[in-house]
Image: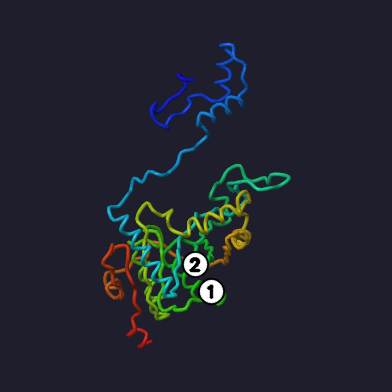
Amino acid sequence: METQTAGDPCGAGKWIRQSLRRIQASLVGIGFLLSHTSIRRLLKQQGYSLKSNRKSVATTQHRERDMQFRYIRRVKQRFIQSGHPVISVDTKKKELIGNFKNAGQTWTQQAEAVNDHEFPQDAMAKAVPYGIYDLVHNQGFVYVGSSGDTAAFAVDAIERWFERKDRPRFADESKLLILCDSGGSNGYRVRNWKRQLQQQLADRYGIEVMVCHYPSGASKWNPIEHRLFSFISLNWAGKPLRSLNWMTALIRGTTTQTGLTVKAAQLKGSYPTKVKVSDEEMAALKLTHREICPHWNYILHPRTQILDKA
């Protein structure tokens, strides 16, 4: 095997150039009869095993990355200890609705037949699932739309969650902490995201809305990714998403042994893209940036004078 081993000879980063059956054929050529299963067993004894590439090298590390992670941890603890709501939000991967293959496997007596190609023009709709994860109560809420993944759609979903009568209540709901990625419909550069939060949450309900964005390239640390979205994907693995109703039902059926429950609803309506927000409209927002990473951390305060006039 010495000639078939590549990589670092002095470390653990070595790999075998050939497959087990090719190694078996080479051994037969020099007079050794050994099955591929025995070769696998011998390789495992030497510390080898089948492994895939692991995404662990961060190529987009911001210089303030660690500072922001520490700040988010402190703010999150303070909000939870004070009884304020803390939610993690994001848009899950968009899904084509129709008779298309869905990744994964499911226990069945016969595999379901789906289209051999996934052409967008054959889809009934393109679903946009926007998720809201309640960190305190381990509960997820997903609103499924079929229009654009825009800031207006994202804030509409958050407002629907805030208005729900069946959501868990908090001791003090005068403040709200939102944890989200730095890009997408709820990105820190999206002006309409901030304007919608001001109008639909801060002004309408008279609450302070604090937003903390995870640094670029760090979305997998957003709690909603590994506490909600991953389990939804496992629950509908191998099940074709043939309708919005079926997709919504599969989301609702997601549970875990640690107590996760998920509620889902469809959010109908048209959400146009490329909505412009002027400098004057931005200046009218009652927005204050925090001293630490001010571009990622800010608070939207209710405009009491506007509420009084209304």
Mark sitting on residue 168 = 1
Q: As shown in the figure, which amino acid type bears the numbered disc 2? A: Asp
Relative image position of residue 82 (x, y in whole percent): 41, 75
Please identify the quarter of the rendering in which residue 83 is found.
bottom left
Q: Secondary structure at mark 1?
A: loop
Q: Secondary structure at mark 2?
A: strand
In this picture, residue 5 sits left or right of residue 260: left
Identify which residue is drawn at 54% across, 73% down: 167
Among numbered discs 2 and 1, the one appearing first in the sequence: 2
Mark sitting on residue 10 = none
Identify which residue is drawn at 43% across, 74% down: 84
In this picture, residue 251 sits left or right of residue 67: right
Relative image position of residue 100 (x, y in whole percent): 60, 48
Q: Is residue 189 above or below residue 111?
A: below
- Foreground residue, 107 or 93? 107
Identify which residue is drawn at 57% across, 64% down: 262
Relative image position of residue 169 (x, y in whole percent): 51, 76
Identify which residue is drawn at 42% across, 32% down: 12
Q: Which residue is mark 2?
A: 134
Distance between mark 2 and mark 1 Cα atoms: 9 Å
* Mark 2 crowd level (few <14, some 14–19, many ≥20, 10 Å Cα): many
Relative image position of residue 155 (x, y in whole percent): 44, 69
- Foreground residue, 303 or 6? 6
In this picture, residue 212 sits left or right of residue 251: left
Q: As shown in the figure, which amino acid type bears the numbered disc 1? A: Pro
**Marks 2 and 1 close (CB-CB < 8 Å):** yes
